Image (cartoon, helix red, strand yellow):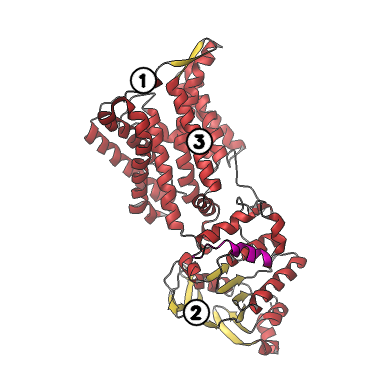
C-alpha cells in the first residue's frame, strides 16, 4: 500500500534521512521507533510531502506520489495527524471537522458521525472552540479530523505525547479499533510497550538510518532495548 | 458642541473608507504575511472604474461601479498574486519592495491613461443633500459610505462564519501547514483571499469618489493609515479592524479639525506609538490554549 524506497531529506544543508525504506501493507499497523532527534517526524513529513524528498521515492497504492503536494496526497487517501495535537483554534470542533471534510473528495457528512463514533468524548463539545479544549481532547479532534477524509492509510506522529493518562488509553483503544476494522496505520511511538501491544511490524530509526526492523515478536529482544534506551 | 457634531460624519466616513481598505489588507497581511504596497492602487483602480462608467451610465456611475470595481480590483489583485507575489512567499521584505514597485508602475499607468490632473465623478442626485440632525446636516453621501462599510463587514463576517470557502480561509489563516496536511489546497485559498481583499479596496475607491476628486496618487493617501488600522486591530481580526478603523478615523479627523493637517498626523502617530507600547499585539489577538 505504502512503499518508501531510499528516502532522503533534511533541512537546508543538514541532511536528516539517509536512504530510509519501509513498507505498509493493507490493514497493517507499522510502528516507527527511535530516540529523540533520529528523524522520525522528518520521515513522516517527507512521506506526506511537507518537506521535499531530496532522493528516493514514495509510492502509495502503486502510484508515485513523491512530487505531489500534501493536499494532493490527502485526496489520494493518506491521512496525517502531526505531532503536538494541533487544531484550528478559532474554529469550533465541528468547524475543524467540516473544513477537512469539505476538502475531501467524498464530502459525505456521515463521515463526521463515523469519526464521532470513534471519539464519543467530542460529541458534547461540537460547538466549543477547538482552542479551548484540553490537550487530550485536541488530540482526539486532530485524529477525528484526519478520519473524516476517510483515509486508506492513517499516519500518526506520537499521538500520546503530552496527553493525560486517562485519554492515552482512549486514544490507544481508538487506534486499535481502527486497525482491527482494516485501516492501515503508520505510527510513530516512543512507548515501547504500547508499540508492542499494537504493532504488526516495527522499524527502529537511528541517525536517519533504519537500524532494525521486523515483526512485533522480534521487538522483545535485548538488542532493541539497547537501541531505544536514552 | 456644534463643531463636534459637524465633524462627526466626516470622521465616520473616513473611518468607513479606512475600514474597507483595511479589511482587505488584514486578510492578505494576516493570512499570507504579504505587505502589499500596491493595495492602494486597487483603490485608485476602483475610483477610475467609476469615472470610466460615468461616460456610459452618467450619474448612476457610483452604484453601478460598486460591483464592477470589486471585480476589476479583485482581478488585478488576483493577477498580482499569480504573477508575482506567490513567488515571494515567506520573504516579506522582498514582497514589500516588489509590491511598492508595482504600485509605482500602476500609478504611472494611470497617469498615462487618464492624465495627471484629478478627475471628478458626479454623485447620483439621491445622494446630494443631507439628513437634518440636531441643527446640523449629515450628508447622504457620507451616510451611504458608512452603510456601505457596514454592509461589507457583515458580508465578510457571514462569508467567514457560514460558507465552506470562508471556513477554509480561516483554517489557512490560523495554521497554514495544518490546513495543507488536512487536504486543503492552500494555493487556491490564497488566490481567492487576494481576490476578495483587493476587490474590497476597489469598493473603497468607489466610495472615495463621493468625498473627493480622483487622481493617480489616490491610494497613497490611505495606504499607510490602512496599515496602521491593521496593526492596531490585530492581524486577521474582523472586530479589531472595525474598532481600530473607527478609532483612527475619528481621532484623525477631529485632530485635523482642531489643529491642522500636519499636527494631526503627529498626534495620531503619537497615540498609535503609545498604544502599541501597551498592546503590541493589537486590540484583538488570537488567544487560545493552542497558542500559549
Residue marked by disc 1: B125
Label 1, residues with CA under 10 Å away: few <14, some 14-19, many ≥20: few
Residue A114 in magenta stretch: yes
Residue marked by disc 3: B229
Tell me where the magenta segment starts and ends, as one range.
A105-117
Chain ID, mark 1: B
Residue A74, label in figure: none
Q: Residue at x 55, y 52 (%)?
A: B174
The x, y position of residue A123, in whole percent, is 70, 59
Cα separation between marks 2 and 3: 49 Å
Residue B202 in magenta stretch: no
Residue A18, label in figure: 2
State the SS at label 3. Answer: helix
Q: Is residue A196 above or below residue A151?
A: below
Nearer mark to the viewer, of 2 and 1: 1
State the SS at label 2. Answer: strand
Secondary structure, magenta segment, majority class: helix
Task: Specify the quadrant of the image occupied by residue B244.
Answer: top right
Task: Specify the quadrant of the image occupied by residue A24.
Answer: bottom right
Q: Is residue A164 above or below residue A26?
A: above
Q: Quarter of the image containing the N terminus of chain B?
A: top right
Amino acid at each position: 500500500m505504502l512503499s518508501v524506497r531510499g528516502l532522503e531529506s533534511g533541512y537546508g544543508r543538514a541532511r536528516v534521512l539517509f536512504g530510509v525504506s519501509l513498507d505498509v501493507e493493507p490493514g497493517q499497523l507499522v510502528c516507527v521507533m527511535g530516540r529523540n532527534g533520529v528523524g522520525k517526524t522528518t520521515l513522516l513529513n517527507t512521506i506526506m510531502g511537507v518537506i521535499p524528498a531530496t532522493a528516493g521515492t514514495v509510492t502509495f497504492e502503486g502510484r508515485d506520489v513523491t512530487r505531489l503536494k500534501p493536499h494532493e496526497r490527502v485526496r489520494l487517501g493518506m491521512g496525517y495527524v502531526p505531532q503536538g495535537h494541533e487544531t484550528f483554534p478559532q474554529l469550533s470542533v465541528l468547524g475543524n471537522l467540516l473544513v477537512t471534510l469539505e476538502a475531501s473528495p467524498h464530502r459525505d457528512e456521515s463521515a463526521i458521525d463515523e469519526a464521532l463514533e470513534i471519539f464519543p468524548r467530542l460529541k458534547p463539545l461540537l460547538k466549543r472552540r477547538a482552542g479551548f479544549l484540553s490537550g487530550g481532547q485536541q488530540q482526539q479532534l486532530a485524529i477525528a479530523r484526519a478520519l473524516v477524509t476517510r483515509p486508506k492509510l492513517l499516519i500518526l506522529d506520537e499521538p500520546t505525547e503530552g496527553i493525560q493518562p486517562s485519554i492515552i488509553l482512549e486514544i490507544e483503544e481508538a487506534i486499535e479499533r481502527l486497525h482491527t476494522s482494516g485501516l492501515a496505520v503508520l505510527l510513530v511511538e516512543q512507548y515501547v510497550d504500547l508499540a508492542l501491544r499494537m504493532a504488526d511490524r516495527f522499524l527502529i530509526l537511528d541517525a536517519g538510518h533504519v537500524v532494525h526492523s521486523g515483526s512485533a515478536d522480534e521487538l522483545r529482544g535485548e538488542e532493541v532495548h539497547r537501541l531505544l534506551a536514552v | 458642541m456644534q463643531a463636534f457634531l459637524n465633524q462627526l460624519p466626516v470622521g465616520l466616513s473616513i473611518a468607513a473608507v479606512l475600514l474597507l481598505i483595511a479589511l482587505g489588507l488584514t486578510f492578505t497581511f494576516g493570512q499570507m504575511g504579504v505587505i502589499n504596497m500596491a493595495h492602494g492602487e486597487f483603490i485608485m483602480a476602483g475610483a477610475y472604474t467609476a469615472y470610466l462608467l460615468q461616460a456610459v451610465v452618467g450619474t448612476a456611475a457610483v452604484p453601478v461601479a460598486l460591483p464592477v470595481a470589486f471585480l476589476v480590483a479583485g482581478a488585478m489583485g488576483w493577477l498580482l498574486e499569480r504573477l508575482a507575489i506567490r513567488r515571494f512567499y515567506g520573504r516579506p521584505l522582498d514582497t514589500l519592495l516588489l509590491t511598492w514597485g508595482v504600485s509605482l508602475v500602476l500609478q504611472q499607468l494611470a497617469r498615462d491613461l487618464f492624465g495627471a490632473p484629478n478627475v471628478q465623478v458626479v454623485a447620483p442626485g439621491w445622494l446630494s443633500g443631507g439628513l437634518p440632525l440636531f441643527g446640523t446636516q449629515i450628508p447622504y453621501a457620507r451616510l451611504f459610505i458608512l452603510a456601505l462599510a457596514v454592509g461589507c463587514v457583515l458580508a465578510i463576517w457571514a462569508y467567514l462564519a457560514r460558507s465552506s470557502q470562508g471556513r477554509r480561509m480561516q483554517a489557512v489563516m490560523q495554521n497554514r501547514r495544518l490546513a495543507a496536511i488536512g487536504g486543503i489546497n492552500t494555493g487556491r485559498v490564497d488566490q481567492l483571499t487576494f481576490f476578495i481583499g483587493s476587490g474590497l479596496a476597489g469598493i473603497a475607491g468607489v466610495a472615495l469618489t463621493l468625498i473627493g476628486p480622483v487622481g493617480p496618487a489616490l491610494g497613497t493617501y490611505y495606504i499607510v493609515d490602512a496599515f496602521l488600522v491593521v496593526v492596531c486591530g490585530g492581524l486577521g481580526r474582523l472586530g479589531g479592524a472595525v474598532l481600530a478603523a473607527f478609532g483612527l478615523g475619528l481621532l484623525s479627523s477631529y485632530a485635523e479639525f482642531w489643529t491642522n493637517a500636519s499636527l494631526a498626523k503627529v498626534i495620531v502617530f503619537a497615540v498609535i506609538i503609545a498604544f502599541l507600547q501597551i498592546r503590541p499585539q493589537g486590540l484583538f489577538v488570537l488567544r487560545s490554549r493552542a497558542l500559549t
